[in-house]
Amino acid sequence: MKKGITNLDELKGKNPFRVPEGYFESLTTQIMEQLPEKRLPEPVKVSLVNRMLPWVYLAAMIAGLGFFFKVLNIGDENASKPSASESFLVQSNTPDGAYSAIDEEEDLDYLDYLESQYVSYALAEKMGNFE
């Protein structure tokens, strides 16, 4: 057992693996010799027609979309534009002034509510009972 320990102590701090002399100098040439030769593909000649095809397709798409939207808008040009009340599913015959009267009444109610809230807050603040 002592003999095994002494052998390890001798190798301590040394690298037991060694590279043969001149290995890395000839490594690149050996690898390159083993690789097959790579043939470059011949360049493909692109004709003028093949270069223009994407632009022709783009122009055809734009023309098709323009025609599509033109067909959709033909019915709308002949008919008169409906008013806002006619565009609803349920038509109502309310006079124009009725909406403004409702809005004014709701505004006044809301202002009264805000005023009452402020007054109650101000009174509670003066009395020192506010939360």
Image (cartoon, rainbow, N blue to C red):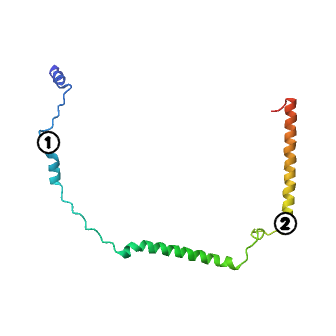
Q: Nearer the viewer, residue 80 or 17?
A: 80
Residue under pointer 1:
23
Mark 1 is on which residue type?
Tyr
Determine which of the numbered discs, if any, sits on residue 96 in the image: 2
Q: Nearer the viewer, residue 49 or 129?
A: 49
Residue drawn at x 17%, y 52% as measured from the top left:
32
Residue drawn at x 21%, y 26% as measured from the top left:
13
Label 2 SS: helix
Residue drawn at x 17%, y 31% as measured from the top left:
16
Q: How far across and down, in percent of the image, does residue 84 sit?
A: 76, 68
Q: How far across and down, in percent of the image, does residue 93 sit?
A: 84, 69
Determine which of the numbered discs, if any, sits on residue 59 in the image: none
Q: How far across and down, in percent of the image, does residue 5 sit?
A: 18, 22
Residue extending farthest to the top is 2
Residue extending farthest to the left is 21
Label 1 SS: helix
**Left or right, 23 with reference to 49:** left
Report which quarter residue 122 is drawn in.
top right
Q: Alpha-carbon neighbours of circle 2 within 10 Å: few (<14), some, or many (≥20)?
A: few
70, above or below 14, in the image: below
Q: Specify which label sits upstream in the sequence, 2 or 1.
A: 1
Mark 2 is on which residue type?
Asp
Q: Nearer the viewer, residue 5 or 23?
A: 23
23, above or below 96, in the image: above
- Quarter holding the N terminus is top left
